[in-house]
Image (cartoon, rainbow, N blue to C red):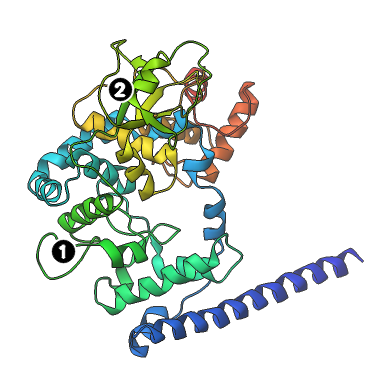
């Protein structure tokens, strides 16, 4: 009886898999037809989608986006670390001419452009390895959160291929379909990518100048105001219970009247409306943010992401770190710290596929949780200072 049950389960799984493949191929056929209706030749469409298969992994990534599920102190620790700051300053020095051109043409601060580049691809070191067309087709032809959106992005990606701005064999990026040095979504590329280096192509994959210029153009179109800072850290009164939120902009004088000062304690001054941003609540760091913070936010609609860009841009300018500590007794780790955690886990016999890359994938998280349980720590799979200290001690 048990053998019959198992055989039946396997049969059901095989039938479901076969059905999923059939549904994907049917949906892909519709996507191809829609691309051809946009004027892309059938030869290009067929060539770009040949042997395209469904990838269910992208659905898991959609549910686990770090900017929405990672504690803010962990998120910032991994994105605004000494390593990225040093790499960013070196990249700015190497590409200073093109950053200056982009800043002059679009009015966007060079350090902010560079910060986007650093967060999105680690200054060109990590574009992502997932085929763009496969990812977008899989998301468009499945129970993703926004299939209609991904359908439009797939067709836009096909237009990019059709116009010769991407080679299907090298058209790779994130699970969501973003690509290039500063991770443009296909539809955004079509609207706002620019040919900054003047070679006749808009190429954010192989041309750093085009990527930097395209990012500056995006921020310009998102309402960036030349010469306006993104914001600054402030000190709020103890037990502050007043208004806050990045969208609640009020005159500087209104915030000063509530007892808010610069982080140094000096009084607020200046014109224009700003908002009080408390990313970890009233017990953590506080910032007054301007419309330029909103422009950064529009690049990837997550406030933790916008803050990472803003803080990294300050460090690239030579400014110091934030003063107020995050409200946690177990701070997050830099990428160097995360790599050390991985190395120590591997030394203990955990299987991480030999990867010591600072990326907290499922295997790393599972290994951390197992170690935490054995060490008497909360088994949450989080790479933190307490985990690193415990690994070093054992």
Q: Is residue 58 left or right of residue 20?
A: left
Above or below, comparing residue 1 to residue 368 in the picture: below
Q: Nearer the viewer, residue 88 or 125?
A: 88
Q: CA distance from mark 2 to mark 1?
A: 35 Å
Residue at 33 percent of width and 48 percent of height: 120
Residue at 15 percent of width and 41 percent of height: 92
Q: Nearer the viewer, residue 10 or 288?
A: 288
Quadrant in the picture for residue 277: top left
**Residue 12 pos. (x, y %):** 76, 72
Quadrant in the picture for residue 175: bottom left
Above or below, comparing residue 103 to residue 325 in the picture: below
Q: Which numbered tag is attached to residue 321?
A: 2
Q: Quadrant of the N terminus?
A: bottom right
Circle 1 packing at 10 Å, graded few (<14), some (14-19), many (20+), is some
Q: Which numbered tag is attached to residue 262?
A: none
Q: Nearer the viewer, residue 285 or 257?
A: 257
Residue at 48 percent of width and 43 percent of height: 66
Helix, strand or loop under label 1: loop
Disc 1 target residue: 195
């Amino acid at each position: 009886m048990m053998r019959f049950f198992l055989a039946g389960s396997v049969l059901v799984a095989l039938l479901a898999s076969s059905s999923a493949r059939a549904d994907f191929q049917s949906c892909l056929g519709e996507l191809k037809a829609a691309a051809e209706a946009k004027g892309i030749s059938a030869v290009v469409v067929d060539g770009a989608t040949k042997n395209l298969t469904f990838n269910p992994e992208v659905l898991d990534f959609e549910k686990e986006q770090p900017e929405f599920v990672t504690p803010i102190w962990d998120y910032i620790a991994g994105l605004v670390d000494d390593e990225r700051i040093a790499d960013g300053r070196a990249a700015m020095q190497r590409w200073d001419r093109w950053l200056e051109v982009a800043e002059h043409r679009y009015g966007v601060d060079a350090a902010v452009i560079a910060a986007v580049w650093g967060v999105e691809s680690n200054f060109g070191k990590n574009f992502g390895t997932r085929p763009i067309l496969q990812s977008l087709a899989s998301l468009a032809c499945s129970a993703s959160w926004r299939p209609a959106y991904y359908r439009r992005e797939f067709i836009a990606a096909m237009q990019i291929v059709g116009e010769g701005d991407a080679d299907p064999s090298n058209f790779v990026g994130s699970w969501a379909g973003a690509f290039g040095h500063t991770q443009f979504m296909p539809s955004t590329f079509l609207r706002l990518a620019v040919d900054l280096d003047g070679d006749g192509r808009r190429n954010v994959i192989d041309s750093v100048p085009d990527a930097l210029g395209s990012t500056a153009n995006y921020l310009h179109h998102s309402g960036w105001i030349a010469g306006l800072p993104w914001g600054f850290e402030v000190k709020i009164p103890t037990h502050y219970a007043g208004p806050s939120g990045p969208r609640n902009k009020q005159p500087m004088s209104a915030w000063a009247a509530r007892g808010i000062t610069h982080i140094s304690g000096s009084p607020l001054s200046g014109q224009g409306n700003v908002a009080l941003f408390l990313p970890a609540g009233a017990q953590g760091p506080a910032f007054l943010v301007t419309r330029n913070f909103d422009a950064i936010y529009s690049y990837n609609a997550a406030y933790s992401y916008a803050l990472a860009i803003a803080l990294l841009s300050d460090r690239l300018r030579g400014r110091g770190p934030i003063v107020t500590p995050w409200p946690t007794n177990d701070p997050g780790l830099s990428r160097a710290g995360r790599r050390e955690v991985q190395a120590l886990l591997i030394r203990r016999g955990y299987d991480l596929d030999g990867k010591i890359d600072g990326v907290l994938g499922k295997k790393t998280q599972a290994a951390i949780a197992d170690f935490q349980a054995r060490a008497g720590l909360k088994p949450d799979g989080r790479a933190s200072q307490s985990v690193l200290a415990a690994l070093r001690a054992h």
